[in-house]
Image: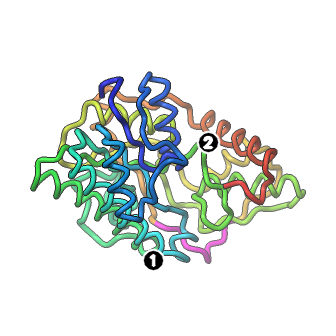
Amino acid sequence: MEKDARIYVVGGETLVGGALLRQLERRGYGNVVGPPGREPELTDGAQVEAFFDQASPDYVFLAAGKSGGIRANQAHPAELMLDNLLVSSHVIHNAYRHGVKKLLYLASSCCYPRQCPQPMRVEYLMTGPLEPTNEAYAVAKISGMRLCQAYRQQYGADFIVGIPANPFGPGEDFDPDDSHVIPALIRKMHEAKGLGVESVEIWGTGTPRRDFIFADDLADACILVMDEYEGPEPINLGTGLDLSIAELATIIKDVVGYPGELRFDASKPDGMPIKVLDWSRLREMGWQPRTPFRGALTATYEWFLQIEQRIGTAHVR
């Protein structure tokens, strides 16, 4: 990307979008359009079209669309699916109409089948049933991925797809009902520590295994992929990290300094048994994560503490 190129990070207020904006600024890209607070309503096609007419971006990182943990996916499947379908269709179509040089669409590891061989390779996509607890969201993300490939096939649009591992970091949503596993556990243990609660209940058995990526590392990988990746097939954006939820909870317990007991509620759903990405293609491009996992968790907790101090735990999101 040229340093003076007009770059639009769609979803600049999200965890990954915010990390992308930080990385672009650090690298000297000074012509970012549509920063947080000045984006259109992405579910409104007319607003998105008017924005592209005015801003005329050269490059687009599509990091928007509502998401959440298992609880949110079970409670709001229609909302999550519709939001992601509308956002991807409006942005991808207008990127084509306005001659965007290149677009990177961020899908989700939820797009892989529930019983996917591990580590998950892109050729395993669409080879089996999805995880039921997040099927609606996954179908919407798959639709965005396929839409990019369709525009590439029919019109020759340089639209590429990245599939991230589970991102986390400063900028997380710590809402107790809708957040992903890392912010949910950080908040639970922090509150239990403050109240002197002797144990924390965690959904599921603790046995599912996940691949996590620090948001700033993911942003770094996204910029590399935007610059260098040209393939029509998706590329996995992972780190090779393979942790069980129980192992993750133990590390977070130590980072937060919570002295109590962790109790796993096996009556609650686990989600996919294993989600670990094959990231060999990214590694062959010379990329490695820069942030040690524990350090990344510590940075995330410190950000939570700063926000909590400013506005109160009840509103940290």
Name the image quarter holding the C terminus.
bottom right
Q: Nearer the viewer, residue 173 or 34?
A: 34
Give the CA separation, mark 2 to mark 1. 28 Å
| Magenta-span inclusion, residue 77 | no
Give me the residue at 49% from left, 42% from top. Answer: 35
Q: Position of residue 81 (x, y in %)?
A: 41, 71
Q: Position of residue 252 (x, y in %)?
A: 68, 47
Give me the residue at 72% from left, 64% from top. Answer: 263
**Is residue 81 something one can see in this rendering?**
yes
* Residue bearing mark 2: 170
Q: How is the image coloured?
A: rainbow
**Is residue 214 something one can see in this rendering?**
no
Q: Which label is found at residue 78?
A: 1
**Callout 1 amino acid:** Ala
Main secondary structure along the magenta-highlighted residues? loop
Classify 116 as above or below 159.
below
SS label for mark 2: loop
Residue 47 in which image quadrant: bottom left
Crowding at label 2, few (<14), some or many (≥20) Cα neighbours within 10 Å? many
**Callout 2 amino acid:** Pro
Classify 71 as above or below 150.
below
Query: Bounds of the magenta span?
Result: 264-271
Q: Position of residue 221 (x, y in %)?
A: 39, 35
Which of marks 1 and 2 precedes in the sequence? 1
Give me the residue at 70% from left, 51% from top. Answer: 186
Q: Is residue 297 left or right of residue 61?
A: right
Residue 69 in which image quadrant: bottom right
